[in-house]
Image (cartoon, helix red, strand yellow):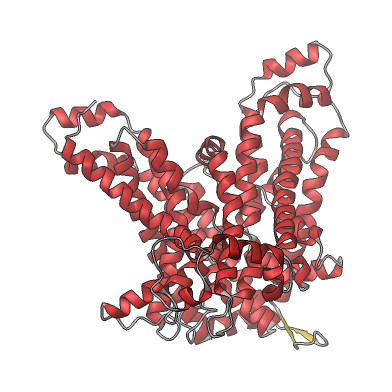
Amino acid sequence: MIGTSPARTFIAHAVLVLGIVIVAFPIYYTFVASTHTLQTILRPPLPLWPGGEFWTNYSEALSGGVRRIGGVGVGTLLFNTTVMALGIAIGKIIISILSAYAIVFFRFPLRMTFFWLIFITLMLPVEVRILPTYKVMVQFGLIDTYAGLILPLIASATATLLFRQFFMTIPGELVEAARVDGAGPWRFFFDILLPLSRTNIAALFVILFIYGWTQYLWPLLITNSNDMNTIVIALRKMISFADADTQWQLVMVTAMLAIVPPILVVVLMQRWFVRGLVDSEK
Amino acid sequence: MTPRVVFPNKILPYLLVAPQLAITLVFFYWPAGQALYQSMLREDPFGLKSRFIWFDNFRRVLADPAYLNSIKVTVIFSIATAVVAMGVALLLAVMAEKVIRGKGFYRTLMIWPYAVAPAIAGMLFLFMFNPSIGTLAVLLRKAGVHWDPLLNGTHAMILLVIAAAWKQISYNFLFFVAGLQAIPKTLIEAAAIDGAGETKRFWTIVFPLLAPTTFFLLVINTVYALFDTFGIVHAVTGGGPGKATETLVYKVYNDGFVNLMLGVSAAESVILMAIVIALTAVQFRYIERKVHYG
């Protein structure tokens, strides 16, 4: 190990602290803004420290203030967003673990065809096929439904590929041993494969939850009624810089409510998240 | 490659792949096919009449100055975002490798922006930088900069790049840290014994060995700047002022859903698909088995 001089270590810490200030500042600043009165926000520069309106603003926002400016209660918004994020995370994990299981542990005609059919979808995010996908949703009557928010976004190959890669590292002897002991495919799946995949599932869950929570374009298109909005979309609708009536303190509270849940998920599940992110991309 | 031991069932595997296959066919292949077909149609906005016109839409799109402008905007935006996000992240990762204490603490604070939706990131930066009530805009004005992202195209672009890059720093940081940890310490120590200083060690050993990570992140960041930043553009500038920040994805949305030029929008979608396929092919050609999440 090469020793690092104290001066160099100090510089490293200084750069890191500066980096964190840059990275964390916008979030901190939002929090600060959510604790001041509208008058303070409208007369910039805003103080660097939280003001005394924390309880006033948050209780006003939660008890109908957001409904007044956005048309929907903040509870509905958080519920919609949670349903969408969980639906995408859980749905994608289920369908992809099943298909990866089939592709790795069974031999059947068209196996590779199916694999390639799924694999190709890896390349195309929903953004490049919005209009036709929207048409399909209209035909199925899925506008303004949770299914409409969730289904098109779970048609992607990433999770399948990850599980496939992981399954291929499982030694054939394990399958053989299970078969000798009389375990059928379902038994093997639930008693051996699922417990082994726990870490992968946890990692994938965090990544997909964030992916679902932060969606923008798709919910924007697929929800017409305010009741089905996700919190990100609702926030966008509340903000108007031209309009002097924007209740900024309430908007900032909403922004905090939109930011904090996914941050908590990432920070609390950091171990799996970091491992999953870095491993799955290799 | 795959375990040679498999289960002998005949029907079960089909049932297992069925859900994913069904969703993929209905929400992926069907719309993608529609996009291809529609890109060769000319339709009136009400969908009453349509005519098959082969590649006319493509010709029209590629000859359209607005489209060429949007290609230029996208290229500038993507390169700037990738360079800023990766540069800052690399610097921070190298510094984080040096410190012994507080590594976990720094990492925890560094990954926050990953969880923030791009659109919200955009709104937060707009809140800080908008000319009327943004604190940082006021400070900039006091410093003598005529800052106005709502009227000045360059300023709008700078704001978008900052917001987009900010959001991506955490991701790049995690990968650079992982990449740095994978570099054998013996190489660096050998260089140190030979008398190479810290800067020289970085540029001659660490940076070249980091190349796979860097290249991989370059592709990922480009894809991110191309697609995931729609929210930022829509929430912050709406493609404006003028068309100064109209990226390709934003144009597909705008032409399709706002201007209702369906054939044109479909043709633009198809061009985008070609770009993504090319990027993914590059990615797989040079860094095998590295897969993008999306």
- The residue at the point 57 percent across, 82 percent down is B61
Work out whether residue A68 or residue A231 is closer to the camera in this orientation and state it. Answer: A68
What percent of the width, then of the height, locates residue B13? 82, 35
Q: Is residue A85 visible?
A: yes
Judge whether A212 appears above or below A143 on screen: above
Q: Quadrant of residue A144?
A: bottom right
What percent of the width, then of the height, locates residue B11? 88, 34
Task: Give the farthest residue toward the right.
Answer: B11
Q: Is residue B27 left or right of residue B103?
A: right
Work out whether residue A27 or residue A87 is closer to the camera in this orientation and state it. Answer: A27
- The residue at the point 70 percent across, 74 percent down is A68
- The residue at the point 62 percent across, 34 percent down is A200
Judge whether B208 appears above or below A82 on screen: above
Q: Is residue B94 left or right of residue A229?
A: left
Screen quadrant of the N terminus of chain B: top right
Judge whether A231 appears above or below A11 on screen: below
What percent of the width, then of the height, locates residue A247? 59, 76
- The residue at the point 45 percent across, 75 percent down is B73
Judge whether B64 appears above or below A165 on screen: below
Q: Quadrant of residue A93?
A: top right
Q: Is residue B216 visible?
A: no
Work out whether residue A42 or residue B136 is closer to the camera in this orientation and state it. Answer: A42
